[in-house]
Amino acid sequence: MATVTKDLERKIEVLRDKIRHHEYRYYVLDAPEITDAEFDVLMNQLKQLENEHSVLITPDSPTQRVGGKAREGVLKARHSSPMLSLDNTYSEDELRNWDRRVRELSGRKEIEYVCELKLDGMSLALHYEDGLLVRGITRGDGTTGEDVTLNVRTVRSIPLSIPREKLKKTGIPADFEVRGEMLMPIAAFRKMNEEREQKGLSVFANPRNATAGTVRQLEPSITAQRRLDYFSYMLLKDGQTHFDTHWKTLNALDAAGFKVNASRKLVKNFAEVWTFIEQEETRREKLPYEIDGIVVKVDSTSLQEELGYTGKAPRWAIAYKYAARSGITKIEEIIVQVGRTGKLTPVAILKPVPIGGTTVSRATLHNMDEIVRLGVKIGDWVEVERGGDVIPKVTRVVEDKDHFRGHKSFHMPERCPVCGGHVVRTEGEADHRCVNASCPAKLRETILHFASRGIMNIDGMGEALVNQLTERGLVKNVADIYELTREDLLSLDRFADKSAQNILNEIGNSKKLPLERVIYGLGIRFVGERTAQFLAEHFGSMDALMNAKEEELLEVNEVGPRIAESIAEFFQEPENRELVERLRKAGLKFTGKKRERGTKLAGKTFVLTGTLAHYSRDAAKKLIEEAGGRVSGSVSKKTDYVVAGDEAGSKLEKAKELGVRVIGEKEMRELAG
Ligand code: IVH
């Protein structure tokens, strides 16, 4: 290992500060000063220095956001003081009454309030000790929550540490707790659901559920991929409010580097509260995340204490909720749509209803389980909600004297509505699928997927063109795209010389795109963008991937048995192999850059257990794999080494029992060279 000098230590710390500054500019202020590529250069420099001098890695280094082992189960943690909820109101009158009560109870004529957005996510507590983030806890039942520290660390708007000078300057103590709202921006939510849909996984109903699901994930590397955001709104010391006003709290958090929502206002009286509420409602549609109202809080901490609490909520705060973006209307029909994977989605055709500024005439019912859960029949009156999702959804059946029930039950068709192919529902899955491999609906969606921007990026090959190409039989699979001629295109409606040439150029350009795009474009079930990337890096060529056995596929990052099986099945199918051959002939990229692996540990199997001092779980795995070794999850006779860190548990015992060699991280590093 290279020697560590003071100079080097300083150099690394300066680099870290630079990266932290740019993370802050990007993730907290939303105002980057450098490009992503420039940022990556800095990050790679740091990673390299830390790789060479692993003793210098600190837990708050920007490289250490994703790391540690996956949680094996749920760990409970108690809150320093209860995490309360808020009383709600939907009416101006009730809000006025609340203000009156606060004034009466306090004996003051006018009260200063702080108005904030009511963010629609989940509340979460962050604990800092000596300025370092040490724990993240979900609200849970308010008294006890779940320890989700490793996931919280991956959220880049949450600082891993606050420098001492900043604490001093802002008056925040070294040990403190921040409470705030974790949320998933609408764009991230849509992207995630799209990817899940492509992989044939169930989608989340709204950004709030997606946030909760992501925060409680057992595997931090998955949380890291989903873009969560966190806004702070409370600062506690030993469970007590620290500053004498709420406004000061928010500004101190802001100055210390936490993300505090900019839409906040200190107001002098009720009239100003109401102005804020009205103003923010007009901006609601344009926000990149969901809010469901405004929170009004008494500014003075001593007055808050005087007012106290009723049951589960403070008397000093209230949530004014905006009217839900929903409407009530009638289901006139339920149709079925067929997607790329053959999934059948029931869609309610509605009597058009205005909701939050647009007219809604369709809403998704997701799948048969959802229809059963809601108890929906054709002719029912239902509530339809338009949330962060593009597609509105039916949330409940309405039944009263004005809204009679419908009578006609919906059944999933036994035959595909597009091709007449068999429809099956695999046990344990929520979705019905058309099993006909050449179903035109599947074909259409497959071609659209292949040509889309994130994959082969064939600009101009949208719905209108793909419909014509598939309907006229010019394109029966993705390889046919590369055999399209000028004449073929000119035979279509609305195609002239120039537009035909444009499409041919686009198709030609797509051949230059890297191997991972081609793999992604094949539309193998469960293989999304990231998996395709890992596969390309691991195998380095389409041929190696095509001929890989399931065991080899399982060695790829994030590939589990289900994905491995799906890939192997795909390439066993002669039709698929033929398709791939045609893509090769067409000149698509079939080789890429393989991540070179060493050979020092070739054939050796390692098991990691306990906490290592200088390596996160992922970093240790990477070190071993890059030296040609394999990391397994459980100890057996075939295990060559068990690497034991602090608090190693049953795996260590098992190793001793089986006589497997146990080593420490120093030895691991030496073995890996
Ligand atoms: S203050 C005792 N401020 O609303 C004070 N909560 O209905 C409790 N929420 O569990 C929290 N935005 O998840 C506060 N600006 C905001 C908020 C907010 C969203 C959520 C929070 C809380 C729930 C209560």
Image (spheres, rainbow, N blue to C red):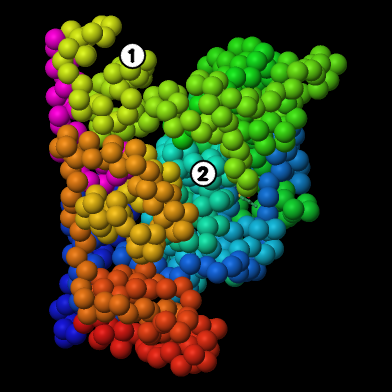
| CB contact under 8 Å: marks 2 and 1 | no
**Secondary structure of residue under mark 1:** loop
Q: Nearer the viewer, mark 2 or mark 1?
A: 1
Task: Give whichever of 272, 393 is nearer the camera.
Answer: 393
Q: Is residue 614 above or below residue 422?
A: below
* Residue carrying label 1: 472
* Residue carrying label 2: 201
| Residue 74 locus on image (x, y percent) | 60, 66
- Left or right, 367 with respect to 23, comes to right
- Left or right, 542 with respect to 269, comes to left
Residue 579 visible in the snapshot? yes
Residue drawn at point x = 20 percent, y = 21 percent? 484
Residue drawn at point x = 18 percent, y = 55 percent? 593
Residue drawn at point x = 27 percent, y = 59 percent? 538
Which quadrant holds the N terminus?
bottom left
Q: Is residue 196 above or below residue 307?
A: above
Residue 650 part of the magenta segment? no
| Residue 491 locus on image (x, y percent) | 23, 8
Identity, as a three-letter code, of the amino acid under mark 1: Arg
Q: Which residues are magenta?
A: 497-522
Residue 510 part of the magenta segment? yes
Identity, as a three-letter code, of the amino acid under mark 2: Leu
Crowding near the residue tagged with mark 1, few <14, some 14–19, many ≥20 C-alpha atoms within 10 Å: few
